Each structure stands twice: as structure tokens, then as C-alpha cells.
Amino acid sequence: MRAGLAGRRPSAAAHTAADAVTVWLPPPLIEEWCSAEALNSVLQKGSGYSGVSGTGDNKRDTTAAALADLRGRAEQAFGRMLNG
């Protein structure tokens, strides 16, 4: 990380070709929830946190009711209290 911040090329990863590499894929509900939180953040910033995005026929309600439902489903499915 420091090498990248300093504009230097980072060194190669420290493992051999025979080492196992694990890829973690989040559960679809968690991925959907994270995407919804990010999109909500962008829409809220763009609307000045007014609860509405766009004008005229393109006007959309950006209240957090659907987001709260999604957060609740993720909490219920994975048995943890999620911050938010």
C-alpha cells in the first residue's frame, strides 16, 4: 500500500504457484444490500438529502424504507445486528 501511495511499483505477491488462493464471494443478499447502501448514498448526496432525486417525470423518492427492509432481511438471514 505504501509503495502505491508513494508512486512506486508494488512487489509481487509473496506466495508460490503451488499455494492455494481462496476467493470469497459474499452471499447475494449481502451483495444486494451493500449495492443498495452505495446507491442510496449517491442519490442522497445528489438530492441534497431532500428525500427526492430528479425532477418532473424523472422524480424518484429516495426515502430509506426499502433500504431498511433489505437491511432487516439481511440481519434476519445472517443473525447479526447490522449497523446502519
Image (spheres, grey):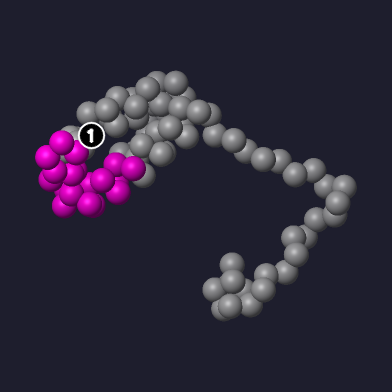
- Side of 20 relative to 37 (left or right): right
Residue 43 sits inside the magenta stretch: yes
What amino acid type is highlighted by mark number 1? Ala
Name the one closer to the observer, 80 or 20. Answer: 20
In the picture of the structure, the residue carrying the numbered disc 1 is 64
Quadrant of residue 59 in the image?
Answer: top left
**Residue 32 on image: x %, y %:** 43, 32
- Say whether residue 3 is left or right of residue 70: right
Which residue shows up at 50% across the image and 28% down it?
Answer: 28
Instruction: Confirm whether residue 52 shows in the render.
Output: no
Position in image of residue 9 (x %, y %): 67, 73
Residue that appears at 12% across and 40% down: 56
Which residue sits at x=59%, y=67%? 1
Crowding near pointer 1: few (<14 within 10 Å), some, many (20+)?
few
Q: Quadrant of the C terminus?
A: top left
Along the line of sight, which residue is nearer the eye, 45 or 3?
Answer: 45
53 falls in the magenta region: yes
Residue drawn at x 63%, y 77% as measured from the top left? 8
Query: Does residue 33 sit above or below 4 in this rendering?
Result: above
* Residue 62 placement (x, y as % from top left): 21, 37
Please state the horizontal and vertical placement of residue 38, each as a whole percent of the image: 36, 44
Q: Is residue 5 above or below residue 20?
A: below
- Secondary element at image label 1: loop
On the rendered structure, is 59 left or right of 81? left
Span of residues in magenta: 39-58
Q: Nearer the viewer, residue 57 or 51?
A: 57
